Image (cartoon, rainbow, N blue to C red):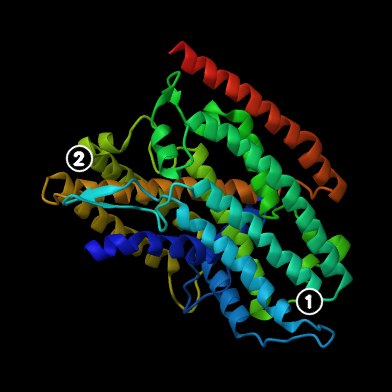
Amino acid sequence: MNTFLILLPLILTILFSLITVPVLVWMERRVAALIQDRLGPNRCNIKGIRLGGLVQSVADMMKLVQKEEFLPSHIKNKFYHIIAPSIAFMSAFLTFMVIPYADNIKIESTTYYMQALPIDLGVLWFLAFAGLGVYGIILGGWASHSKYSLIGSIRAAAQVIGYEVAMGLSLVSILITYGTISLNEMVIYQTQNFFYIPAWGIFIQPLASLIFVVTAFAETNRAPFDAAEGESEIVAGYHTEYGAMKFGLYFVAEYIAMAASGALIVTMLLGGYQLPYLNTQDLINNFDLILWILIILTIVMSFLFIGWIRSHNILVLNGLNETKLYTSFILIFSTFFVILMSYYSFGYGGANDIGVMILQFVIFTLKLFVLHFVFIWVRWTLPRFRYDQTQKLGWNILLPLSLFNIFITAIVVVGVNYGS
């Protein structure tokens, strides 16, 4: 058990950064279909089981893995051409190492950290690797020996430099408010109240939060800040000359970077793994009541979800009634969950700390996927900015606003501390 708790943060890092990529691709397609008033992927299946279109993402992933690796003959610097996607991928992956998925738990006088890398310099770690990822883009564009790739990499470099300055300055305001650069301490700070509302970063630092979210979109090259790979202008940007898994690494790196940015936004601005008005000790003390609320919510949501499946899942493949299959699966899972929660709520489990850790992990995951929906929603709602508009927004608007916010924050914090 002790070994498992030590390895758990590393397992969660791999889970959030790699396993969720097919889920994010599926979300991207389904939300895009919803916005564009169409069905989206719903035909790919395994023995008639479609999982709402999720099988399509798995099939695409297998296709990329099995494609032949091809290196264009005009490429001279083959080593740099091959290593560039790996740099982009590893930089995005390593940013997840400092994200706290739950509060630290203490079992038999031993403290277990729910961070893969429990250091107090989490914000600096994120900024360092977020900036390092652009080297993979620059190297890939230069080593491809293509004018389109080179233009895309130059655009990406200029964009990251401009927006990382604004991102860092917006973080300064947030760090002044929290008084720490430890991500876990920031989450603990947000359990307080601010004029009867949760003291989340988005409420106590609204301007810094807005700047950070906008720069996070730009840092991850997500629309409307994807001028580095503008299809209508420069074919596919920096990955024009890439195929098979080399392209796949760039593709996966973009989604991992999106997930990492979302995780940092949840941690710093949306209360992290905490529920509003309830800190970890409150959850432990009222764990029985919370479990019963979860049991009731599970039963209600299961029936609502089953009704939704029956009304929308109308396709039957290979003689398999998929609606009955999903209904049976949901009922079995819900029954198991209710029995398990009842077992703990009647005091037989004796593991409130572990139960709260699991609950906080679920809270963090739900917040993260809601934020992913916002990322996807923005992509399919706003048109791509022109390159000059992107640079003007970063240097002429966000940078001065960040400096102004630091000035105001410093005055307010000093005034509050002086008054107290």
Q: Which residue is mark 2?
A: 288
Is residue 35 rendered to the left or right of residue 123?
right
Residue 66 lies in quadrant: bottom right
Q: Residue furthest top?
A: 419
Q: Residue 60 location in percent, x, y?
A: 60, 75
Q: Against 19, is 415 above or below? A: above
- The x and y percentages for residue 73 are 82, 88
Mark 2 crowd level (few <14, some 14–19, many ≥20, 10 Å Cα): some
Callout 1–callout 2 Cβ contact below 8 Å: no
Three-letter amino acid code at the position of disc 2: Asp
Give the quadrant of residue 208: top right
Quarter that holds the C terminus: top left
Above or below for 120 versus 144? above
Q: Indicate the position of residue 57 as horizontal and vertical percent values.
A: 57, 70
Total numbered circles: 2
- Asked whether the viewer can see residue 356, the reply is yes
Q: What is the secondary structure assignment of the residue under circle 1?
A: loop
